[in-house]
Structure formats: C-alpha cells, structure tokens
Image (cartoon, rainbow, N blue to C red):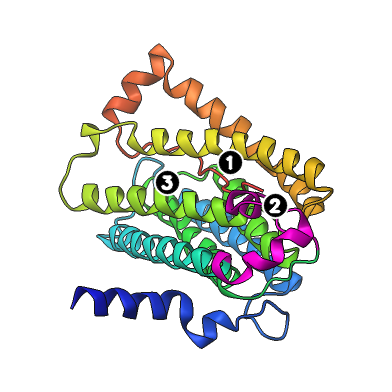
Amino acid sequence: MSTALISSLTYYLSEHPYIVGFRWGHSQSWGSTWSFLITSIFLYIAVSSSLHIILSAFLPRNRSVSLGHIPDIHSLLMSILSATIFAGILLSTAAEIRDTRWFWRRSKTATPLQWLLCFPLGTRASGRVFFWSYVFYLTRFLHMLRTIFAVFCRRRLAVSQLFCNSAMAFTSFLWLEFSQSYQVLAILSTTLVYSVVYGYRFWTGFGLPGSVFPSFVVNCQLVLVVCNLVSHAGVLTMHLIKGGCNGIGAWGFNSVLNSANLLLFLNFYMRMHSPMRRRIVNTSPELEPPDVIMQKN
C-alpha cells in the first residue's frame, strides 16, 4: 500500500503529462507577462498603503482590527503549499537529472551539483522543475497577504516589507523569464524553511505561546541568508569555470536586490539582539523581521 502511495505521489508531482509538458510563455502561462507583474506589484503597494492610511485616519493608532483565525489559516495554507512545492521540485529534479544527464558533457557539466548551480547556456523554461518554479512564483502573491494582515492586526506598514515582498515576486519572475541558474536549490531551501516557519505560525496562532521560541522565525531566515551568500560564490565560480551559466544577466540584477535585502535583514537582526531591543522581542511575539528574498541566483 505504501509503495502504491509513493508511486501515485511521484506520478502526480513529477510525471503528470501537464508537469512534464509545461512551458513558460506569455500566451501559455497565467501571470507570465511583464505588464501583469508590474501591475500586481503596483496594486499590492497601493492597496497596502491605502488601507494603512484609511485605518490611521479613522481608528486610534493603538487599536487593531481583529481578523480572527484568518491569518492562521493563511499560514496553514502556505505551509502546505510550501511542503508540496518542496516535494514536487525534489522529485522533478531527480527525474530531470535522470533524463538529461547524457547531455551534460556538451556543457562541461560533470555532476548534479554543477547542473543545479549552473544551467547550460540555451536552457529554456520548460519541463518539470520550471513548472514548480512557476507554482512558487504564484505563491509569492499569496505571501503578500501577510502585509494586509499586519496592517489590520498590528496597524503597522513597514517599507522594508513592501520592498521585500515585491522583490520576491520580481525575482521569481526573472527565474522563469530568463531560465536563471540555481533557482532549483533556491526553491528547495526556501520552501523547506517556509513550510516549517508557516507551520510554526499556524501552531502559535492556535495554542503554543510564541514567546517559547521568540527568535525561531529570525533564526530560520538567518540560515537562508547564509545559504544565499554561499550561493553567490558557487554560481560565480561555475560561471567562470564553465564559460557561462544561463541567465547570468538576471543573476547580476538579482544580486543587487539580494544586497539590499541583506542590509535590511542585518539591520533588523542587530537591533533585535541589542540589549534594549531584546526585552521587547522577548515580550512581543508579534514582532517579525522583513522576509528574506530567496533568490539564490
């Protein structure tokens, strides 16, 4: 029975005809145009800012708007989606390595790690791993709802949060548009951590006190930041050794976004661990850092 279940999951997560035959294209994939991306980010910033201004005008600053368990249900949904994407892209990566390994010699690729770090030049956004990259891209817009929750429940709108969430959507779009290298490992690490973090948020929302692990979310994001820094060295090294990695131009642009986001996170991390702020963090489970941009290019 367990073998049949595993076979069924493998089929629906990596061998389904729609997944195998996926192709990123402006006429084939919903949300795949530049106009959609830019409009969506603009609306996200406009709606968030407008809600913040309206609530500030009509409600006292220290009065929040209760949303019940809607944020907790959102966390549960994001945790399940993240775990599904992790499993899907893991199985799909194994299948792609199995099916395309014979072709690697032409691109000076010797090991699966080299392929994960550096896609051969001419790689197109089609097939299994790009399907799950597309699903990951779409979930970035669901992730933006956390900003709306913050405006209602904590009456707070941070510019850093607007920037980070917008950059995450933009980065995920570039992965697909330019078949950018290293995105597979980026999505694997991000979805693994996010499935845990969102599961933790769901659990604390329904019972477990958040003060038990006051820096849990921050420590998870710190791990992602470290992995992100290491990835830059790996991609750049492979690019120089192999004579080119696919999507290296987009990689350079994403590096700028990564640097900006890294500064925001380090600023938050240093303030959180300062003597004056540590007391606030330990007594305020609602305090959370800017989300890390997982664009391990």
* Residue found 34% across the figure and 31% down from its top: 215
Disc 3 to disc 1, C-alpha distance = 15 Å
- Type of the residue with mark 1: Ser
Disc 1 to disc 2, C-alpha distance = 30 Å
Q: Which residue is mark 2?
A: 118
- Type of the residue with mark 3: Arg
Q: Which mark is residue 160?
A: 1
Q: Quadrant of residue 120?
A: bottom right
Name the magenta segment's main secondary structure.
helix
Which element type, helix, strand or loop, lies under badge 3?
loop
Determine whether, in the image, residue 77 is placed left or right of residue 222: left
Disc 2 to disc 3, C-alpha distance = 43 Å
Q: Point out residue 108 in the picture as x, y percentages from the top left corner.
A: 76, 53
Give the residue furthest to the right.
Answer: 243
Q: Which residues are magenta?
A: 97-121
* Residue found 56% across the figure and 48% down from its top: 294
Which element type, helix, strand or loop, lies under badge 1?
helix
Q: How packed is label 1: few (under 14 Cα within 10 Å), some, or many (20 or more)?
A: some
Q: Which residue is mark 3?
A: 155
